[in-house]
Each structure stands twice: as C-alpha cells, then as structure tokens.
Amino acid sequence: MPAPFAAALLPLALLAPAASPVSLVEADFDPATAFVPPAAVSYADDLVPYGSHATVVTDRSAPGRTVTVTGLAPGHEFPAHLHTGACGADPASSGPHYQDAVDPVQPSTDPAYANDRNELRLVLRTDEQGDATASAAVAWQPRAGQARSLVLHAGTPAGPHAAGDRVACVRLEK
Ligand SMILES: [Cu+2]
C-alpha cells in the first residue's frame, strides 16, 4: 500500500531540514583587555583563571541552559545568571538580569519578577579540579538579542571579593 507509506514519510521529510534545537557556545576566559575582545571575560583571575573554559548548551526544545566550566577555583560556588547586556571591560556592562516579564521597577527586587522562574539562574559548584556543571530550565525562550551574556558572580567563599561581584562573563549573543 504505497499511499499510506508515502504519507507517513512526508512529515519526516518536512522535519529533516529544520535547524538543530541545540546550540553551543564554547569559550575560554580571557582578560577584558585582550587585543581581540574575548568570547568570555574573567574579571577575577584568582576565581576564574585566564584560559579556563566554559560551555553553554541551549536546548530550544526544552527551554533552558546547561553550563559546564572547567579550571575554575576548586570547591567554590558561583551563582550564574542570564544578563541582558554584552560582556565588556566594565563588569557592569552586562546590565541587569534578563527577565521574561520585565519588572517596570529597575533594579528589580520585587519577588514577583526577581525569581528563578522569570530569570534564568543556576549555581556552579566546582569540584576539587575546579570543574562544574549545572542546568536550569525555564518555560520561556529569551527574546532575540536581549539575553546577551551569562554572568558568573563571586559567590561563596568569596575571598577578597563581595559575593555578588561579577567575576566572569560569557558572550551568548553579539
Ligand atoms: Cu547575575
């Protein structure tokens, strides 16, 4: 019975050219002062050594991100968030947290907006090698061009840094 067989193949043929729902950002942390603007910036070489590495996997079929880092300070907790701005020489250039529903009052402190369903937040807990993987799932896709960076904060133990200091930034969009 050729007709049902052909009908069954048709949806597969339509799906085949679609782009993979998974995209990947691979970046080495470098100083912001590098001659070529780096794909990932470290602002604190003691916590995020130059040459350490980040991988950010985005799966559009199950919104969220999986972040892997290697070679960071061992035994450390780095909170990491999606931020709106681009990585730059000034750690503040990455701007506020990306929010699906944007709080009309910025900086956002209202728990109705500043929460882990409306923002993408995760915590990277490094092992004794300085490696960590963490995932966060959310119910939304970021608006194109508005979630430009993943920022790592100093977290705990913060050492000479304040826990909220931005210690590194991974470029997700131009
Ligand atoms: Cu943040």
Image (cartoon, rainbow, N blue to C red):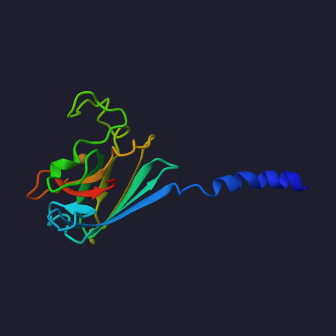
Whether residue 22 sits left or right of residue 42 in the image: it is right
**Which residue reaches farthest left?**
160
Q: What residue is drawn where x is 25% and y is 51%?
A: 86
Query: Quadrant of residue 6 in the image?
Result: bottom right
Extreme-top residue of the structure: 104
Total tally of numbered discs in the picture: 0
Task: Give percent across and percent down for residue 23.
Answer: 45, 58
Quadrant containing the C terminus in the rendered view: bottom left
Determine whether 40 is above or below 110 in the image: below
Height in image: 10 above or below 118?
A: below
For the N terminus, which image quadrant? bottom right
Q: Which residue is pictured at 24% across the width and 64% down the height?
A: 38
Of residues 132 and 97, the one drawn nearer to the viewer in this rendering: 97
Question: Toward the viewer: 84 or 74?
Answer: 84
Mark yes or no: residue 164 visible: no
Give the percent coordinates (x, y) of residue 5. 83, 55
Of all residues, the one furthest to the right in this rendering is 1
| Left or right, residue 137 beside residue 48 | right
- The answer to which quarter of the image holds residue 77 is bottom left
Image check: 25 left or right of 83? Answer: right
Image coords of residue 163 (percent x, y): 16, 50
Residue 144 occupies quadrant: top left
Query: Does residue 48 appear in this view?
Result: yes
